[in-house]
Image (cartoon, rainbow, N blue to C red):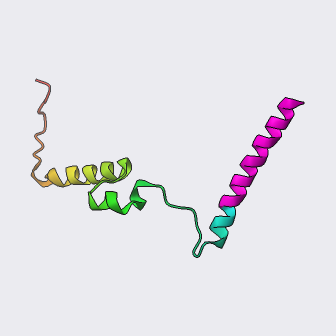
């Protein structure tokens, strides 16, 4: 019986916490969930820190700019493995 009281108390406290967060979002002006992603942090943006996916895209984009495909020479019959 003691175990059931502890479980009910924990569930009640958890339900109250979730309800309180929901009320805060509803009553807050322009209420919406906070942006916890790296892109939502102004301080990191000022320092040039992006999320891993954005940094990867930027690195790939700059790598493509460095390659000059118009100067590639194709020699028929040439074997690059020799």
On the rendered image, what quadrant is the N terminus found in?
top right
Give the residue furthest to the front.
Answer: 2
| Closer to the camera in the image, 67 or 69 | 67
| Closer to the camera in the image, 10 or 43 | 10
Residue 12 lies in the magenta-colored region: yes
Quarter where residue 40 is shown: bottom left
x, y percent for residue 53: 37, 49
Q: Above or below — where is 76 with respect to 26?
A: above
Q: Above or below — where is 52 with respect to 40?
A: above
Quarter where residue 24 is shown: bottom right
Identify the residue at horizontal 80%, vertical 36% (top origin): 6
Identify the residue at horizontal 86%, vertical 30% (top origin): 2
Residue 63 lies in the magenta-colored region: no
| Closer to the camera in the image, 51 or 2 | 2
From the viewer's perspective, is 2 left or right of 40? right
From the viewer's perspective, is 12 left or right of 78? right
x, y percent for residue 39: 40, 58
On the rendered image, what quadrant is the C terminus found in?
top left
Give the residue furthest to the bottom.
Answer: 29
Identify the residue at horizontal 45%, vertical 55% (top origin): 37
x, y percent for residue 25: 63, 66
| Closer to the camera in the image, 77 or 16 | 16
Q: Main secondary structure of the magenta part?
A: helix
Quarter where residue 41 is shown: bottom left
Q: Above or below — where is 34 with respect to 64?
A: below
Give the residue furthest to the right.
Answer: 1
From the viewer's perspective, is 67 left or right of 42? left
| Number of disc labels | 0
- The magenta segment: 1-21
């Amino acid at each position: 019986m003691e175990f059931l009281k502890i479980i009910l108390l924990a569930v009640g406290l958890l339900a109250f916490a979730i309800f309180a967060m929901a009320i805060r979002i509803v009553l807050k002006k322009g209420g919406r969930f906070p942006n916890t992603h790296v892109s939502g942090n102004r301080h990191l943006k000022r320092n040039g820190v992006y999320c891993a996916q954005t940094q990867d895209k930027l690195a790939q984009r700059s790598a493509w700019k460095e390659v000059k495909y118009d100067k590639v020479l194709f020699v028929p019959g040439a074997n690059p493995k020799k």
